[in-house]
Image (cartoon, rainbow, N blue to C red):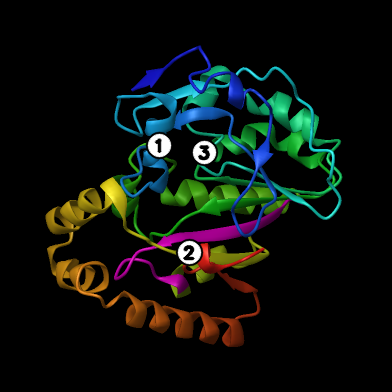
Amino acid sequence: MAMKDNDGAGEKERKLYSKSKLPASDYVINPYVGCLHGCTYCYACFMGRFTGHKEPWGTYAEPKEYTSMKLPGEQKGKTLLVGSVTDAYNPAEKRYQKMPRILEALQEYQGHVEILTKSKLILRDMELLKRIPDISVGVSLAFCSERDVEIWEPRASGMRERLDTLRVLHENGIRTYLFAAPYFPGLTDLNQLIDWTEGSVDSVCVENLNLRGSYKAKVMALVREQYLDLLPLYRQVYEKGGGAEYWKGVEEELDRLKRDRKIPVISYLYHEKIKK
């Protein structure tokens, strides 16, 4: 694993924020080039093409040295997301500590700030988080066993650590949400996750596991190696054209949860089709 002191993204990325193409945010901040969590399914692995990195995605993280901490001019009614292609609290943050200065700048933001992470390290910055007027923190967790987390997300915080992170944030007055993503066929148990996070989150968001590009083969190989009994399901969903039918069933599950549970359940299944 590599942590380098130079800003590997170059001059163009030294502005604090960039405009977002995601459906639920208007601006994004990504304090690192790369991420050390090593999630097998990470869609952001394509970023190496644009940053000139030859190392495998998940093995490097370079801190960005911002030339300006200036915030967007248009803020009211706009959402700024921290962590769209890198986790701002990935293990490199322990060394470089980029987030405290960013959080200090965000105290002046007049829109909504969101942070999405898989790391308990965010608790380090609790007092700074409290000073941001309109903020929510999402913690990603799609698995219900420590074994599954270790297989798919080897250097992220464990399952119990993430559940505890949500609880502590919520107890300290921070709005929180469970980001049950990516939803893994045969592995993600939304009922269990909602039970575990009851009282610790204000909402639950769900996004599907969308396989394409270079990481599709990696995911399928890992399913074959670790979950052989699920391999027929994954082949049906991702190789034999059964995806639409499967995700329709998941949508129906989400509709039931919306009716039966007190907590809001928000779907980002096939989020590329969702417009702002």
25 with respect to 110 (left or right): left
Residue 87 numbered mark, or none? 3
Which residue is pictured at 55% across the width and 44% down the height? 84
70 with respect to 168 (left or right): right
- Among the 4 quarters of the image, the one containing residue 2: top left
Instruction: Give the secondary structure at mark 1.
Output: loop
* Residue 261 seen: yes
Residue on which disc 1 sits: 37
The correct choice, above or below, for 144 with respect to 60 in the image is below
Q: Looking at this view, is 261 or 233 the one in front?
A: 233
Give the amino acid at mark 3.
Answer: Asp
| Residue 15 percent coordinates (x, y) | 68, 26
Instruction: Give the secondary structure at mark 2.
Output: strand
Mark 3: few/some/many CA within 10 Å (<14, 14-19, 20+): many
Residue 243 within the segment the image draws in magenta: no
Residue on which disc 2 sits: 207
Distance from label 1 to label 2 (Cα)? 19 Å
Distance from label 3 to label 1 (Cα)? 8 Å
Give the amino acid at mark 2.
Answer: Glu
| Residue 186 percent coordinates (x, y) | 29, 70
Which residue is pictured at 52% across the width and 68% down the height? 273
- Among the 4 quarters of the image, the one containing residue 145: bottom left
Q: Which residues are magenta?
A: 173-190
